[in-house]
Image (spheres, grey):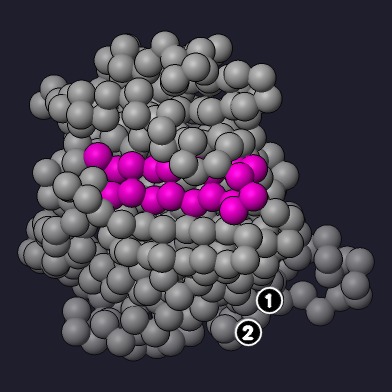
């Protein structure tokens, strides 16, 4: 078996080189995800220029979330129970290309930031190393992008992206020569700048990139009660202000869980390794946070009808993944060919999870084309996002409530009819729900 170093430097003919490249790519991905300590040491020994990292790794992995996002929004569609709202194919293709390009741009921007900050934390400024740190460290996020192909699973992609923060943290001392005791502060500074850059890039591309129903983007939601304000990322030895986050990371727990995971993998104990990974993710996400709202509490507030449209299906579930829990309920209402889906998701129980779920809520938008309208605004402490086609064939209205519940209604009807139908949902009662501490 070739090592990543051997396969990435091969100069054999097209067929052998292609096979070796694919094999080396898989080895590198698995090593970074499962054995980050060893992987970063291997990467540090390599002397690959930025162009080689881009061609042999970044261009391939960055395509995963772009293609999956196109499939999810334009092929699968957003919805459930047979109700599916799809982004037009041409718009979806434009969004895929723009999103892919902006992902590559973000890696370069983050590498420049990481390189500039390294000396301030006792490290060394080496742009090729900084680029490797970001490009390889983002592996979990690239792979997690595959969940975008099934919009209902998109939040799992957010969790995968957050694991990349930990991977970057593990590579900081090796690649950037930042002292271990300052690696947490350095990582926090890089990620803080990255969040701001992502918000700016997201705003710049919002007019051409489809962003369905509150599941896209980075940044935006703080802890319950601090929505829209700037709070702090509190880490040992550093206090960095980041718009809309309130995350407390216990690095000792992260390190302990990481060691337990690697030890379990070494002895082949997959069950212990899985538990350790869950503990590590929980600690890296700032702990498990408050208990999520009970599915039955949200389901009880789903009306039995929306005007003349009876409820024809309902689903309530609570899922757990990588150390965190989240609640999701949805219902379908139909009359003839008219369909409406109402969905409520509790994204406020884990602030770090919510970072990736509602970037739109921190901005305002009033966009209109010949065929479509999209608006983002705030009223009485609630963030609203509405989008619809002028021909009345589809509409979506999303509300982010102060307690971190994302309430969404979508259907194949005009926006005015959707607004009127959603008046049957007791928004005030949903917003009044509280979590157990």
Instruction: Decide if residue 202 is on the left or right side of residue 412.
Output: left
Instruction: Decide if residue 405 is on the left or right side of residue 223.
Output: right
* Residue depicted at x 73% and y 62%: 90
* Residue depicted at x 48% and y 84%: 128
Q: Quadrant of residue 208?
A: bottom right
The picture places residue 259, in percent across and down from the top left corner, at: 32, 43
Q: Is 409 a magenta residue?
A: no
Residue receiving disc 2: 51
Mark 1 secondary-structure assignment: helix
Type of secondary structure dominating the magenta stretch:
strand
Q: Nearer the viewer, residue 153 or 6?
A: 153
Characterize the local packing of mark 1: few (<14), some (14-19) or many (20 or more) Cα atoms within 10 angstroms. Answer: few
Q: Which mark is residue 55?
A: 1
Q: Quadrant of residue 2?
A: bottom right
* Residue depicted at x 58% and y 85%: 49
Can residue 39 be spotted in the picture?
Answer: no
Q: Which residues are magenta?
A: 383-401
Q: Nearer the viewer, residue 252 or 418?
A: 418
The picture places residue 237, in percent across and down from the top left corner, at: 8, 64
The picture places residue 409, in percent across and down from the top left corner, at: 45, 34
In which quadrant will I find the C terminus?
A: top left
Instruction: Decide if residue 48 is on the left or right side of residue 109.
Output: right
Q: Which mark is residue 311?
A: none
- Name above or below for residue 340 compared with residue 382: above
Can residue 208 be spotted in the picture?
Answer: yes
Q: Quadrant of residue 81?
A: top right
Pointer 2 with pointer 1, Cβ within 8 A:
yes
Q: CA distance from mark 2 to mark 1?
A: 6 Å
Q: Nearer the viewer, residue 98 or 330?
A: 330
Q: Nearer the viewer, residue 164 or 403?
A: 403
The picture places residue 320, in percent across and down from the top left corner, at: 39, 26
């Amino acid at each position: 078996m070739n090592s990543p170093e051997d396969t990435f430097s091969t100069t054999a003919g097209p067929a052998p080189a292609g096979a070796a490249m694919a094999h080396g790519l898989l080895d590198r991905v698995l090593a970074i995800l499962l054995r980050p300590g060893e992987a970063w040491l291997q990467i540090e020994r390599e002397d690959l220029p930025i162009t080689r990292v881009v061609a042999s790794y970044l261009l391939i992995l960055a395509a995963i979330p772009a293609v999956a996002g196109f499939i999810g929004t334009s092929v699968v569609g957003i919805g459930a129970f047979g109700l599916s709202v799809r982004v037009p194919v041409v718009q979806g293709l434009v969004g895929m290309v723009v999103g892919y390009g902006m992902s590559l741009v973000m890696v370069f921007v983050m590498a420049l930031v990481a390189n500039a900050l390294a000396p301030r934390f006792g490290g060394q400024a080496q742009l090729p190393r900084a680029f490797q740190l970001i490009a390889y460290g983002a592996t979990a996020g690239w792979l997690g992008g595959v969940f975008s192909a099934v919009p209902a699973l998109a939040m799992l992609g957010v969790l995968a992206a957050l694991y990349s923060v930990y991977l970057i943290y593990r590579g900081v001392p090796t690649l950037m020569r930042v002292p271990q005791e300052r690696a947490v502060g350095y990582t926090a500074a890089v990620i803080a700048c990255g969040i701001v850059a992502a918000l700016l890039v997201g705003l710049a591309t919002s007019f051409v990139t489809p962003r369905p129903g509150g599941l896209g983007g980075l940044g935006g939601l703080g802890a319950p009660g601090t929505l829209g304000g700037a709070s702090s990322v509190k880490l040992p030895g550093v206090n960095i202000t980041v718009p809309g986050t309130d995350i407390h990371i216990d690095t000792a727990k992260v390190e302990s869980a990481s060691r337990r995971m690697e030890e379990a993998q070494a002895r082949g104990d997959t069950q212990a390794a899985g538990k350790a990974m869950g503990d590590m993710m929980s600690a890296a996400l700032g702990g498990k946070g408050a208990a999520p709202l009970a599915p039955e509490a949200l389901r009880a507030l789903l009306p039995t009808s929306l005007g003349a449209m009876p409820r024809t299906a309902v689903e309530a579930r609570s899922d757990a993944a990588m150390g965190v829990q989240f609640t999701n309920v949805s219902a379908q209402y139909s009359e003839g060919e008219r369909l409406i889906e109402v969905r409520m998701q509790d994204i406020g129980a884990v602030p770090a999870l919510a970072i990736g779920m509602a970037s739109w809520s921190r901005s305002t938008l009033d966009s209109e084309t010949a065929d479509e309208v999209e608006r983002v605004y705030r009223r009485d402490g609630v963030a609203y996002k509405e989008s619809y086609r002028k021909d009345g064939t589809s509409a979506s209205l999303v509300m982010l409530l102060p307690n971190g519940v994302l309430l969404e209604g979508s259907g194949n009807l005009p926006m005015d009819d959707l607004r009127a139908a959603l008046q049957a949902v007791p928004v005030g009662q949903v917003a009044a729900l509280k979590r157990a501490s």
